[in-house]
Image (spheres, grey):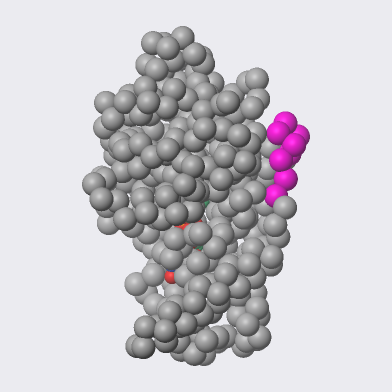
Amino acid sequence: MKRALITGVTGQDGLYLAELLLEKGYEVYGLVRGQNNPKIPMLRRILPDVHILTGDILDLSSLMRAFAASRPDEVYNLGAISYVAYSWENARLTTDVTGGGVLNILEATRLYRDSSGTEPRFYQASSSEMFGKVQETPQRESTLLWPRSPYGVAKVYGHYMTINYRESYDLHASSGILFNHESPRRGPEFVTRKVSTAVARIALGLQDSVALGNLDAKRDWGFAGDYVEAMWLMLQQDKADDYVISTGETHTIRELLDVAFGAVGIDDWSSRVKVDERFMRPAEVDLLIGDSSKAHEVLGWKPRVSFEELVTMMVESDLVEQKARIDGRNRDGH
Ligand code: GDR
């Protein structure tokens, strides 16, 4: 039985990846941060078979303890501060966690390898935010990186450090340059989930409108469930490498709104959306579109869920969730 250690296991990708690995018969260990972390009960409820370890990617000795406890064949570093807008306000913290944390876990992997005599494989969650002010369209593995946020800069550091450990220490370390990937498990601060939740609530008469930032931003959005499969595939290769994971399609926030509102029968959403300066970013990544032909050729990976299916799935899931809340409130007599 293979063993995997996942950081960021309580996030959207961590949950899908843990689920996938459990299905494949892995013993899965999840690193969880902080005292009394409110996400632990959620993780226990959704995936009771995941072994929970406490630790922090800022704390090398906690990582070394996690390696000793889990003895992993595969390590997936998904832990990060991942909200781009937040990174301008917390640039130092984002740099330490999203960037410096990668060095810690690479070092823990190397030390564990050398002391155990095993060959753990490492996956780093790199990001299309590293392309930022895009220098080439579509973006591929060789495209010059030009990050546009403290988050993007921190991810570039983690990306190159992963390559550096591969080249310096011959570590089986791969980096997945993932474009935006969404699902009903996406956090409410990200635009797709913010929209799907708002649309569900508007359809149920719970709110009138939603306030958003730049409606002209473009993203290449895929389904997170498809993307975690690519992570796993990368670690099954004889040779570690870097791969762009994307759909190759780009859509604006306006198109996202068309599909989301369309799913509840609202064709004209203009009165339902307010543009609010608070959600504008100091610098924007205007056009992200990925070329994942290398992943297709080498890994045999292709996304399965289309943009329309993804957005509709999210709105439908939020309708169920919001209705359950109303029913719960009615039952409690509020
Ligand atoms: P992103 O995701 O920054 O691409 O990073 P997000 O969903 O936050 O933003 C996407 C685009 O939508 C525009 N936008 C808004 N965004 C938010 N969050 N809220 C709004 O109200 C809003 N209005 C417009 C943004 O300006 C932006 O252009 C995600 C994260 O998961 C990263 O961790 C990951 O690395 C990348 O995707 C790939």
- Residue 298 is inside the magenta segment: yes
- Residue 123 is inside the magenta segment: no
Measuring from the top left, give residue 258's x and y in whole percent: 63, 77
Quadrant of the drawing holding the N terminus = top right
Measuring from the top left, give residue 314's x and y in whole percent: 58, 67
Residue at image x 58%, y 52%? 224
Residue at image x 44%, y 61%? 187
On the image, which quarter does residue 181 sit in?
Answer: bottom right
Quadrant of the drawing holding the C terminus = bottom left
**Left or right: 298 with respect to 144?**
right
Residue at image x 50%, y 67%? 193
83 is higher (above) or lower (below) than 53: below
241 is higher (above) or lower (below) than 145: above
Residue at image x 45%, y 83%? 326
Measuring from the top left, give residue 332's x and y in whole percent: 37, 83
Measuring from the top left, give residue 58's x and y in whole percent: 28, 35
Of residues 2 and 201, which is closer to you in this image? 2
- Residue range corresponding to the magenta coloring: 296-303
87 is higher (above) or lower (below) than 229: below
**Left or right: 60 with respect to 52?**
left
